[in-house]
Image (cartoon, rainbow, N blue to C red):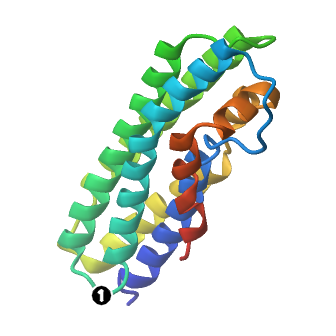
Amino acid sequence: MEGTNPVNKKLAAALSGGAVLVLALSGCSSSDDNSEKLNSWAKQVCDAVQPQTKKITAANTAIQKQTADDSAPEDVQKVDSQAFQDISDAYKAMATAVRKAGAPDVENGKKKQQDAVQELNDLSTAYAGLKKKSDDLDTKDQAKFADGLKGVATELEKLSKSGSDALAKLEEGEVGQAMAKQRSCKSASAPASAGKS
């Protein structure tokens, strides 16, 4: 009979893929010809997103820690449930931050902003769904629990591969440059290298 440990590892691997998704919000190269308006927009978004990125990284770490030993199904379920809730909340907060910031001062800014907000809200809903699935797993039966966890891990994998196209589009060109200048966006991108599984 397979224990929950290999499945947990799969879950952790899928999660670290998901964390990369949020770290798209980190900007890349920097140039000095951005408008004051755009810089102000980038600062507002970066400052609001940074604590949420940390929340997602912490949730990720919690799940990975739980996979380090042969934990009891109840413990795994409790940690996973809290982590999925935290990630769902973080994406929702990011969606709110991007919506409140308004459209960036670039071509098609409004559409890019709306698409990114929609995508972040969809991610929030998807992680809330994973929390419910995780909460519904039968912890009394180790084999059933491991099977159920496999299903959660598979969905999580799909979620992390689904990418963040709208976020990537939002951060193209001048927006990305403006975000790259923000200290809070630079520090938000730091945990990207910690995605070990």
Q: Which image quadrant is residue 113 in?
A: top right
* Kind of element beneath mark 1: loop
Residue 143 vertical placement versus 153 (above, below): below
Residue 130, image x, y percentages: 39, 48
Q: Dot 1: few (<14), some (14–19), or many (≥20) neighbours within 10 Å?
A: few
Residue 185, image x, y percentages: 56, 42
Residue 64, image x, y percentages: 40, 73
Could you tell me which residue is drawn at 28 percent across and 54 percent down? Answer: 81
Identify the residue under disc 1: 70
Residue 6 vertical placement versus 172 (above, below): below
- Drawn side of residue 20 relative to residue 4, left or right: right
Let me know if residue 134 appears in the view: no
- Drawn side of residue 89 relative to residue 45, left or right: left
Residue 173, image x, y percentages: 82, 29
Could you tell me which residue is drawn at 60 percent across and 67 percent down? Answer: 193
Kind of residue indicated by mark 1: Asp
The one nearer the camera, 104 or 38, is: 38
Q: Quadrant of the N terminus?
A: bottom left
Could you tell me which residue is drawn at 36 percent across and 80 percent down? Answer: 4
- Drawn side of residue 51 relative to residue 167, left or right: left
Let me know if residue 161 appears in the view: yes
